[in-house]
Amino acid sequence: MRLGLQVPNFTWSNGQGQLGDTFGLIAQRAERAGFYSLWVMDHFFQIRVIGPPELEMLESWSALAFAAGRTNHIKLGTMVTGVTYRHPGLLVKTATTLDVLSHGRAYLGIGAAWNEEEHQGLGVSFPALSERFERLEEALQIAHQMWSGEQKAYEGKHYHLARPLNSPQAVQKPHPPILIGGMGERKTLRMVAQYGDACNLFARMGKEELQRKLAVLRDHCQSVGRPYEQIERTTLDTMHITGDGRNGTFTPTSAIAHLAELAALGIDQAIFSMPNVTDVEPFDLLATQIIPAVEKIAVAGR
């Protein structure tokens, strides 16, 4: 089993003047601890489940490029880019650039977008949900075409590309893995089966609901003729890890047990944020106890 670190909050006690240094240090600590991947949200305002919109929020792809320069092998991804934020041709070019400059470490995390407040605030069109899903599917088709090297014109309902040229091409073959965010059973998980390389589910849903969502994904894979085993199954969670489990936090032992439960469900990669991400303690515990143990846990169905 693999672990990924999400950094959704950039408001830290040492202030905005140290934001870049702190984020770079977090990325380096994550890599040294043995995390497989590092993720940032693709938002322009802070989301309300974390804090008010006025809190610091970095642009995601620039932040990942910065992290790439501070690290050597950790994978880098958006959790996830809203399809409305960037024209798909430019988004594929952006993801490709990160992949090339990081020597093949990019994920393309993408979804249908949801935060109307930041769309309105920055003057970005926020169409109805049905149209956003249409745009998501076209963006996925464009990504596959551009990464295949096919330059014929793309004519969709919403996007029209006369020459989808992508040079240089991505380092990862056939392309950087595409993680499609969202848990909708009729559209999102169908797109994962048809176009994606990874799904992402909320770990807090619990065992039974996770099993049900994965069963839906398996059915979609069967319907489109895609081996279910080709899909990387990931979860998103929050884990506050301390050495002694103070204030209801995870100890290394309880963290390992929790992650083992996810692996038993077939989760390949558990991605989580840490409220104490600026502290050294959780990274030391992850490096010395948690990640070495988790790497030995077999994922069900693998």
Image: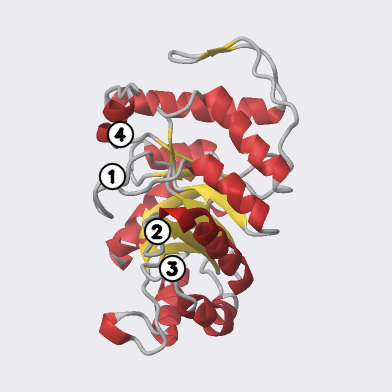
Decide if residue 277 is on the left or right side of residue 90: left
Q: What secondary structure is found at the residue carrying circle 2? A: loop
Which badge, 2 or 4, comes first in the chain's sequence? 2
| Marks 1 & 3, CB-CB < 8 Å contact | no
Q: Nearer the viewer, residue 21 or 47?
A: 21
Q: Where is mark 1, residue-wise?
A: 54
Q: Is residue 227 visible?
A: no
Quote the CA–CA distance across marks 2 and 3: 15 Å
**Disc 3 marks which amino acid?**
Val
For disc 3, the neighbor class at 10 Å (few under 14, some 14 to 19, many from 20) is many
Q: Which mark is residue 277?
A: 3
Which badge, 2 or 3, comes first in the chain's sequence? 2
Quote the CA–CA distance across marks 1 and 4: 11 Å
Which badge, 1 or 4, comes first in the chain's sequence? 1
Mark 2, mark 3: which one is toward the viewer?
2
**Disc 1 marks which amino acid?**
Glu
Residue pictured at 53% horizontal, 36% vertical:
195
For disc 2, the neighbor class at 10 Å (few under 14, some 14 to 19, many from 20) is few
Q: Where is mark 2, residue-wise?
A: 15
Quote the CA–CA distance across marks 2 and 1: 14 Å
Residue pictured at 65% horizontal, 57% vertical:
70
Which badge, 3 or 4, comes first in the chain's sequence? 4
Q: Position of residue 196 (x, y in %)?
A: 53, 41
